[in-house]
Image (tube, rainbow, N blue to C red):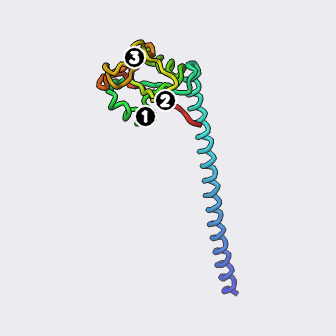
Amino acid sequence: MRLILLSGLLLLGTFLANGDEKDSDVQMLNSMIEAVMILQRDFANLRHALMTVHNARSFGRGSERLYVTNKEVSKFEGLEEICSQAGGHIPSPQLENQNKAFEDVLERHNKAAYLVVGDSANFTNWAAGQPNEADGTCVKADTHGSWHSASCDDNLLVVCEFYFIL
């Protein structure tokens, strides 16, 4: 009789141990589901905050591109690396409102900055008598947003262009 009782207790213990293991797995799964839900909520909040800042910054300028400076100066050669490390690009305004947003940064800091003009640009804002390759092979925008040929060795305000693709 004791042997049957001990066998029963052993089986009950094994069953309970397995049940605890399953409960532990269920608890772990529930914890993981809860963690994923928290991450999804946090990601949605972060995306909303980021888009709010983007929309607010681009609203007044009518531009979907942001032009931001770190207030440092650089030659053209270093600009691509600086902007790339920040997740941006060398400015390349494609529309008048984008050039205006770029100009606002230059005017605020009272400095010129480099930009890139594509071969098939639909929009340009060259100053009178420009481009003039005698002045250099790079392009800079002055504080009024006008474009000028410039030496690539000038130390100009670092401005990077950022845009979002959603």
Q: What SS does tag 3 mark?
A: loop
Mark 1 nearby-residue class (10 Å; few <14, some 14–19, many ≥20)? few
Instruction: Please tell me whether mark 3 or mark 1 is closer to you in this view.
Output: 3
Q: Is residue 38 left or right of residue 115?
A: right
Q: Quadrant of the C terminus?
A: top right
- Name the residue type under label 1: Ala
Q: Quadrant of residue 164?
A: top right
Q: CA distance from mark 2 to mark 1?
A: 26 Å
As drawn, the residue found furthest toward the left would be 153
As helix, strand or loop, the secondary structure at mark 2 comes to loop
Question: Where 30 sits versus 82, above or below?
Answer: below
Whole-percent x and y of residue 143?
A: 42, 14
Given the image, on which type of amino acid does mark 2 rest?
Answer: Ser
Q: Is residue 139 visible?
A: yes
Give the number of the disc on residue 130. 3
The answer to whether residue 46 is above or below residue 17 is above
One can see residue 53 in this view: no
Q: Are marks 3 and 2 in contact (CB under 8 Å)?
A: no
Residue 118: x and y in percent read 45, 29
Which circle, 2 or 1, is nearer the viewer?
2
Which residue does the numbered mark 1 point to in the structure image?
A: 86
Q: Amino acid at mark 3?
A: Gln
Q: Is residue 144 left or right of residue 76?
A: right
Q: Mark 1 or mark 2, which is nearer the start of the sequence? A: 1
Q: Name the N-terminal-most of marks 3 and 2.
A: 2
Residue at x-position 48% and y-position 21%: 124
| Pointer 2 with pointer 1, Cβ within 8 A | no
Left or right: 96 in relation to 5: left
Where residue 141 appears, x then y in whole percent? 41, 19
Q: Which residue is mark 2?
A: 120
